[in-house]
Amino acid sequence: MKHYDLVIIGGGSAGLAAAVSAYDQGVEDILVLERDRELGGILQQCIHNGFGLHTFKEELSGPAYAERFIDLMHEKKIVYRLNAMVIHMNDAKIIEYVSPQDGYVQVKAGAIVLAMGCRERTRGAIAVPGYRPSGIWSAGTAQRYINMEGFMVGKRVFILGSGDIGLIMARRLVLEGAEVLGVAEIMPHSNGLPRNIQQCLNDFDIPLYLSHTITRIEGQHRVEGVQIAKVDDNFQPIPGTEIDFDVDTVLFSIGLIPENALTEEAEIEMDLKTRGPKVDESYQTSLPGVFACGNVLHVHDLVDFVSEEGEKAGVAAAKYIKEELEGGHAIETQANEGIGYIVPQFIHPNNVDKRIELMFRVKNQYRDVHLVIKKDGQEFRRLRKKTMQPAEMEKVILRRQDLEDINAAISLEIVEDVA
Ligand SMILES: Cc1cc2nc3c(=O)[nH]c(=O)nc-3n(C[C@H](O)[C@H](O)[C@H](O)COP(=O)(O)OP(=O)(O)OC[C@H]3O[C@@H](n4cnc5c(N)ncnc54)[C@H](O)[C@@H]3O)c2cc1C
């Protein structure tokens, strides 16, 4: 069985950044395994611009952003296999993959970076009533068909879910000549970035129906229509509020789920809130030598943060391989009132160089609140926040010395008492 110092599962933006940074730290014996026909991951189907504002201070398309990292892979001659689907991974760091070129292969890794991205929630997850005709798509699949395979998915379209993929697809479909009759969102607020609401819906006069859901899909062979209705506080449709649309296509953009079948199979400890593995400050999971970054860890809205995380995971994996990663006392990060989740879930202060970023999402939309940071239950810092919303990932930065006197936990919570 061939041995590699580092095996990276997934060649999207997280995996590529991890490979390049581990290489720069002196770990050159790397194998990147990617199941798709090219590197770059989801970026290859995102042909709109808006990528790389933080990393490259430029507005790039998804493929152009991916190309920067793919060029670095080639420059450094980092080994990768395409069409290589990892099917198993165990706690001895033995990875099994299959590919048309290589057949069935087992490799042993000194360290592993998990960078498998995420998948879309489907109609089945929310049990929409009605028939099951053709013309029903998850938004990301429709995006791949239109942008990469060259097929149009429909002419008159309705979209459920106002996350970024749904918003971007609304604009994309109009630019390709379709009519988008509306976007329905069950929450009273959109789950997409404000800039996408403006640029993808408002600029194209596409109506957004907040607090609405699809109550029926019509059509036995092909979609012939959808019915939407307003929902009450318990998200139940309110009789009498129904609106019918004559459409031939419905897109579902109702959330992303980190792709963790392999992680769970290796019995790595999971976080039920992020649906990704629990990690420490070095992005190391509960299985020593296995690291995670990008959308497999928690769903990101900006690729720049994915690349940053991949880079840090690559550096940490290289330290692990060189036996430079310390352990020692660990403190927990706790998501209290109003906070959906925090990554990382644990911190070993010994491994924090100068500062650490806690990435988190809030549960609701907030205006004029305080973000309160507590050390072992005692208030340590209070930050005033003008607005906070679940669609935008937030971060707080702690210095190494901030962590020194903590015994058990550091927590974040929202306090709505701002006068
Ligand atoms: C539709 C859409 C629009 C977006 N728009 C923007 C935007 O405008 N601006 C912005 O900054 N960000 C945007 N993002 C976010 C950003 O692009 C993503 O968060 C980021 O690219 C995710 O990178 P990743 O490497 O974690 O995952 P991915 O890119 O999904 O990469 C994961 C890779 O792992 C591979 N893989 C999975 N399982 C296996 C396996 N078992 N074996 C081998 N390979 C495997 C997959 O094939 C894939 O290539 C958008 C995202 C989407 C989905």
Image (cartoon, grey):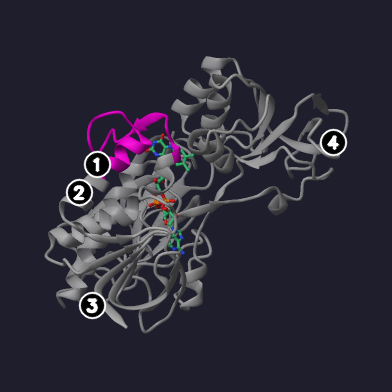
Q: Mark 3 or 1, which is nearer the eye?
A: 1
Q: Mark 2 or 3, which is nearer the eye?
A: 2
Instruction: Report the magenta residues as a range.
Output: 45-69
Q: Residue at x 53, y 26 (%)?
A: 172
The residues tagged by marks 2 and 1 sit, at their Cα atoms, a distance apart of: 7 Å
- Contact check, label 2 and label 1, Cβ < 8 Å: yes
The quadrant the C terminus occupies is top left
- The front one of 365 and 91 is 91
Label 4 sits on residue: 219
Q: Is residue 121 left or right of residue 360?
A: right
Q: Mark 3 or 4, which is nearer the eye?
A: 4
Upstream in sequence: badge 2 or badge 3: 2
Label 2 sits on residue: 72
Q: Residue type at mark 3?
A: Gly
- Residue 411, image x and y in percent? 38, 60
Label 1 sits on residue: 68
Q: Is residue 305 left or right of residue 318?
A: right
The residues tagged by marks 3 and 1 sit, at their Cα atoms, a distance apart of: 34 Å
Q: Secondary structure at mark 2?
A: helix
- The front one of 152 and 276 is 152
